[in-house]
Image (tube, helix red, strand yellow):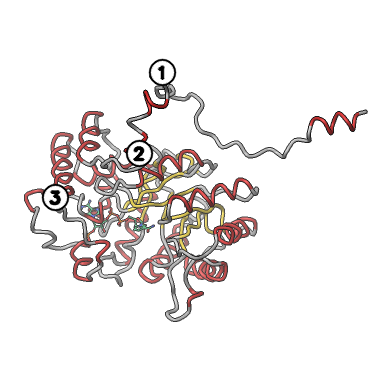
Amino acid sequence: MALDRYYTLGRSGLRVSPLALGTMTFGENWGWGASEEVARGMFDRYLAAGGNFVDTADLYTEGRSEELLGRFIADSGSRDRVVLATKFSYNAQPGNPNAGGNGRKNILRALEGSLRRLRTDYVDLYLLHTWDRITPAEEVLQTLDDLVRAGKIRYAGLSDVPAWYAAHLQTLARAHGMHALVNLQLQYSLVERNIEREYVPLAQELGLGITAWSPLAMGLLSGKYKPSEAGRDGEGEGRLQAIKSMGLPSLMDKFTPRNWAIVAEVEQVARESGLSMAQVAVQWATRRPGLGSVILGARNLAQFEDNLAALDRPLDEAALRRLDGVSALPSQFPYSFFEPTQQVGIHGGVGVGDKPAGYAPPVWIDPAPTPAYAGDTAEAAR
Ligand SMILES: NC(=O)c1ccc[n+]([C@@H]2O[C@H](COP(=O)([O-])OP(=O)(O)OC[C@H]3O[C@@H](n4cnc5c(N)ncnc54)[C@H](OP(=O)(O)O)[C@@H]3O)[C@@H](O)[C@H]2O)c1
């Protein structure tokens, strides 16, 4: 089981498993989750397999996910071992704008609630859950920095924000000597690869590890849908049907011709490799550049066991290339503009080539204090 290999998250000393335990399904009050007994089974199984990285949010199942996790961690005595991530942003008090969003007042309110439900006095990784479009970057950063200094959180990161905003925060943190962010948590799967354009290079350049949510596209790639079912668009049981019946438009666009072609290739690769479709989809995500950890979501133990074994048997390069090919992103501006002009128009026909592996990996050099002007030093020495 590959879960007990621990990788550093971003440019930090925090070591996490390549598969994280997602707990959005812990609790039944959203209509697609797991009972306490089943959730406990998944938690215990994850720890037994060597996993150490657990993701929740104050939003999930209206706090129930955090409550259950707090109970499981306390009962198993695993607080030191677990890297516990939770999130703030979502409003807990209708009518009160300061009980949501990313302002200082809400971050402090939200953290106190999470610590209480999680039965702990610190969070390992505290994430801004979703951009609120109004809070200044400096306010978010200063608050997170204060929380690290106060010992209430160990590290901070961002989820579901524009790439420019993440780059802005990270650059400000570095330039002003604040604790840098270590994690970007974003949606990533064979059917949702948009983060590859901006976020993956950003993460690699600025020392952020990416954690991928919904690696099975909320069930589309899990094996419960087959290409032969294309056009039936969500009959049967499962989360996608529950979402469909709730009429959440941003989550309902999964049944497209492009996605059915991807499902078909996943099924083919699964048949040839002896892996399940869910394992193929999860393993593909873990092997993409910039990925720190892939967050598993499951509703029952059988699904969890399936997903947990995703790394047991490596897919060969040819299979990975086929999956890359069928799900490739169309080229878009500005990449469609400057990529074709590079070789001749910019580099004068002189090969640039990729740097050999290990050559000058991008490492952030913290700005040194401005050196004294040499002339002044010379003056002073006279
Ligand atoms: N930061 C964010 O905004 C954000 C957003 C979403 C999630 N997350 C995090 O990411 C985690 C994973 O996200 P996700 O739950 O959406 O992941 P996912 O893997 O895309 O979807 C999980 C769902 O797919 C189905 N499934 C999973 N494994 C299966 C298997 N082996 N066979 C058949 N069906 C299977 C189950 O749904 P059904 O059986 O009910 O169909 C399960 O609930 C969450 O728990 C949460 O921690 C973060």
| In the image, residue 16 above or below residue 84 | above
Label whose residue precedes the other's in the sequence (2 or 3):
3
Which residue does the image show at 51% across and 47% down from the upper left?
A: 182
Give the residue at mark 3.
Answer: 257
Rounded to the nearest whole Å, what is the CA distance between mark 1 and mark 3?
41 Å
User: Amino acid type of disc 3?
Assistant: Pro
State the image quarter where residue 137 is shown. bottom right
Which residue does the image show at 34% across and 41% down from the upper left?
A: 286
In the picture, measured across the screen, residue 137 lies left or right of residue 64, that is: right
Q: Is disc 3 surrounded by few (<14), some (14 to 19) or many (20+) residues within 10 Å?
A: few
Rounded to the nearest whole Å, what is the CA distance between mark 1 and mark 2?
20 Å
Q: Quadrant of the C terminus?
A: top right
Q: Is disc 2 surrounded by few (<14), some (14 to 19) or many (20+) residues within 10 Å?
A: few
State the image quarter where residue 291 is shown. top left
User: Amino acid type of disc 2?
Assistant: Tyr
Q: Quadrant of the N terminus?
A: top left
Which residue does the image show at 88% across and 31% down from the upper left?
A: 379
User: Amino acid type of disc 1?
Assistant: Val
Ligand 1 quadrant assignment: bottom left
Give the residue at mark 2.
Answer: 335
Image spot of residue 366 (x, y percent)? 62, 39
Give the residue at mark 1.
Answer: 350
**Residue closest to the eye, 341 or 206:** 341
Label whose residue precedes the other's in the sequence (1 or 3):
3
